[in-house]
Amino acid sequence: MAGAIEWQSGDFSAAQALARTAGRPLFLYWGAGWCPPCNRVKSEIFSRDEFAVRLRGLVPFWLDGDAPGAQALAAQLKLRSYPTLVLFAPDGSEITRLPCELDGELFIAALDAALAATHSAAQSLQAALDGSRILDAAEWTLLSHYSWDTDEGVLLAGRAPGATLTALAQAAAPVAPDAAIRLRLLSLLFPAAEAAPAAAGTATTAHAGAAALATAASVAELLLGVCRDARLARANMDIFGNSGAQLLKLAGAAQPGLAGALAQAAQAWADDMWLSVPDRLTAVRLQMRMARFGHAAAGLPELVRARVAEALAAVDDAYERHTLVNTAVSALNDAGLPAEADALLQAELAHSHSPYYFMLSLASSAKRRGDAAGMLSWYEQAWRAAAGSATRLQWGVTYLISLLDNSPGDSPRIEDAAAGLLADLSATADAFRQRNLAQVRRLAAKLSGTPHAPALQQALHPAL
């Protein structure tokens, strides 16, 4: 973590007491050492001087997913996805959850808006939905930069996210058009399954957007308008970089022209020296992905190869390199260069602070090739190399389930893995909480009714 920040860890109650006594907000970071987005947050946001300056007026708390009791505390605080960034008021109430995908400059602006907020995100949401008062532009900014994908029911409380975001976008439009556009873009990322069923005799919409009424033409018009506005496109670069392909799938016949417009915006980001190296490479990857939607550009695979090499040569910080390698592997695979992606992963194993994460990527690559033996070998290596109680438990579950699916007759190997996983389970104080619980439930369901690993099945029984 950034040396300029005096992170609290361990006793969250003590950190809350300090915040309350000092009258300072509490900033919580929940993550794991192997997680690429977490490493991006550390290198892109936490390392910034302006971030460290702001945290001097807060109580910074770092909750590592592998720390003793971390999964139990995460369940209490409704944290699941790595990373999750939460800002609490001095009294312990939650102000907002901040999106980790923003680049450093935009994140600082979003943090400033949250620190200056006169209402929490929950209060602003409630007022926006029930019409009890008019929200000002600052409140709309707070809601548009809320991390809806890590909400875990804190704000949504059972509401359908896509429909909620669509309603917010409509309400924000007259007061805060930029916030309205971001909310509308975010609404499109939630599945159509939450929308009302189609009328009898009509086809169910194939959109992945939030509302069945969102037509391909209206989506295309929205996306094209944003892509052609350099300022708006840059403000939503995180959405396009991570989900540009998902958005284009909603645009119907307009996809080729829209792909060209988004590729042009991505090219500008790829050449923006103010952006971090991983974020510039994400933009290159986005250019490559636009080729799937009709964007015709010669030499894209060669461009990806050259930009990956250039980026790797420029970065040696452990956190930044970890997320960079993950992005580079994705870009090389998108460019049709899987052998080069695998070579990069294997070369990085000796240098990475979390090589077991890249072993999982190698397992996924072997699976795509149809190499079941190679897949199982990499899953096993990842588990045996993994550090941290939660990580070992989750990696071990992945390995054992893959064994059961792909080599069900290999009883010695299955029993050996089960014995090792039973030891990991016994060594984990919060094995049946939060992310751990989700994994052990998967394994318990897979083992149930089989003759394998009776001792492990008995230990997993509370998860059923």
Image (cartoon, rainbow, N blue to C red):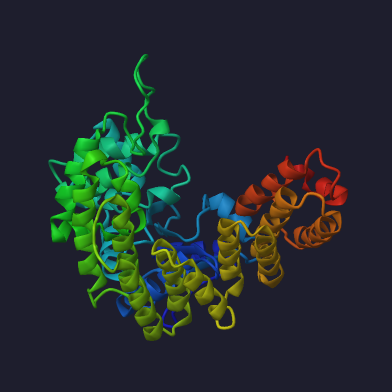
Q: Residue at x 66, y 70 (%)?
A: 386
- Residue 379 is situated, as x and y percent measured from the top left of the image, at 66, 63
| Position of 314 relative to 150 (above/below) | below
Q: Is residue 364 left or right of residue 372?
A: left
How many marks overall?
0
**Residue 418 quadrant:** bottom right
- Residue 107 is situated, as x and y percent measured from the top left of the image, at 30, 65
Q: Between residues 186 and 179, which one lies in front from this camera angle? A: 186
- Residue 368 is situated, as x and y percent measured from the top left of the image, at 56, 57
Q: Residue at x 48, y 46 (%)?
A: 152
Q: Quadrant of the C terminus?
A: top right
- Residue 390 is situated, as x and y percent measured from the top left of the image, at 65, 61
**Residue 10 quadrant:** bottom right
In the displayed image of the protein, which residue is found farthest to the front? Answer: 298
Q: Is residue 270 left or right of residue 308?
A: left
State whether residue 1 appears in this view.
no
In the displayed image of the protein, which residue is found farthest to the top? Answer: 200
| Position of 278 relative to 76 (above/below) | below
State whether residue 264 appears in this view.
yes
Q: Is residue 308 left or right of residue 260?
A: right
Q: Residue at x 82, y 55 (%)?
A: 410
Q: Between residues 287 and 269, which one lies in front from this camera angle? A: 287
Q: Is residue 63 left or right of residue 233?
A: right
Q: Residue at x 20, y 58 (%)?
A: 233
